[in-house]
Image (tube, rainbow, N blue to C red):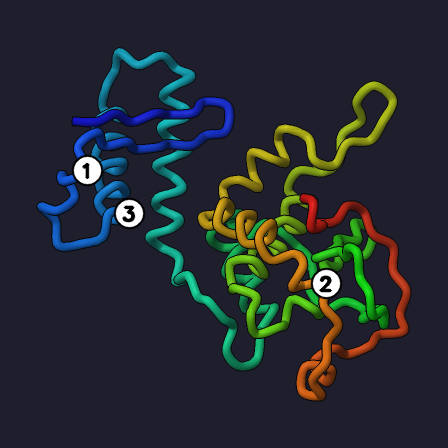
Amino acid sequence: MGQVKIDLQFLKIDTEIFNAVYFDYFDVCKDEVAVGLEKKLLSKLSLDRSLPEGLKETVRVLIGRERVANNSKLKLKLKLNGKIDLKEMFDRLNADYFKNKIKASVEWGKKVNKKNLTSFRFGSYDPEKKIIRIHPRLQCDFVPQYVLELTMYHEMCHQWAPMKRKKGMWVAHHPQFKAKEMEYRFYEEARAWEKKNWKKLMRPISTKNEKNKFEVSNKTHKTLEITTLTG
């Protein structure tokens, strides 16, 4: 009928159904059916004592992600409506993914007045002051909530998995960091959106209402490592 693949390197699970009409037997969408099958498989695998320890650990991580997703109030949204509460977003991510162990403040970053952007930093983390800054351009109405949340989550990961020194160089996005970052429920959706819409994010802000959203801060700051359009 089909098969399920578990990627041990990137901690991913993919369901493939050979018979396409299989999904016609259900009243819900194809994605929901696939998620249901994955949950059932993980549940059965968790009870299999013959599994190698490495696979058992992977299964535990994947089950943990599902629990986070079920407990979170986050739902995919095409737009962010109304005022964006960064503190509420930080607190929710901190509880869902970091057991409230991330200690940092969060604020909108400084607006740079450039008409023709070629790139910009989605966010930054100051390890000395423990401040996370989010680029104000992400307040645009067309930016999905999960893109803004992944940016926040990415910067929180810098505190969770600090830089490591490797071969005489400091590495920020080391394997431990990347593994933690990919635990975010909508990681793939957010990255896919960024790749598809980066040109739109580069456009000048033209309307008066949008310009008023970008509050300029004259305070300079030092950054550690940031999320960019190229990841």
In the picture, the disc for residue 202 is 2
Q: CA distance from mark 1 to mark 2?
A: 40 Å
Q: CA distance from mark 3 to mark 1?
A: 13 Å
Q: Amino acid at mark 3?
A: Asp
In the picture, the disc for residue 31 is 3
Q: Which mark's residue is nearer the viewer, 3 or 2?
A: 2
Taking the spot 19% from the left edge, 37% from the top edge, the residue there is 20
Q: Position of residue 25 (x, y in %)?
A: 9, 46
Q: Amino acid at mark 1?
A: Ala
The correct choice, above or below, for 34 with respect to 75 in the image is: above
Taking the spot 62% from the left edge, 31% from the top edge, the residue there is 176
Taking the spot 69% from the left edge, 58% from the top edge, the residue there is 104
Which quarter of the image is occupied by the N terminus? top left
Q: Which mark's residue is nearer the viewer, 3 or 1?
A: 1
Kind of element beneath mark 3? helix
Q: Badge 1 is on which residue? A: 20
Kind of element beneath mark 1? helix
The correct choice, above or below, for 124 with respect to 34 in the image is: below
Residue 189 is left or right of residue 230, and the answer is left
Q: Earlier in the sequence, mark 1 or mark 2?
A: 1
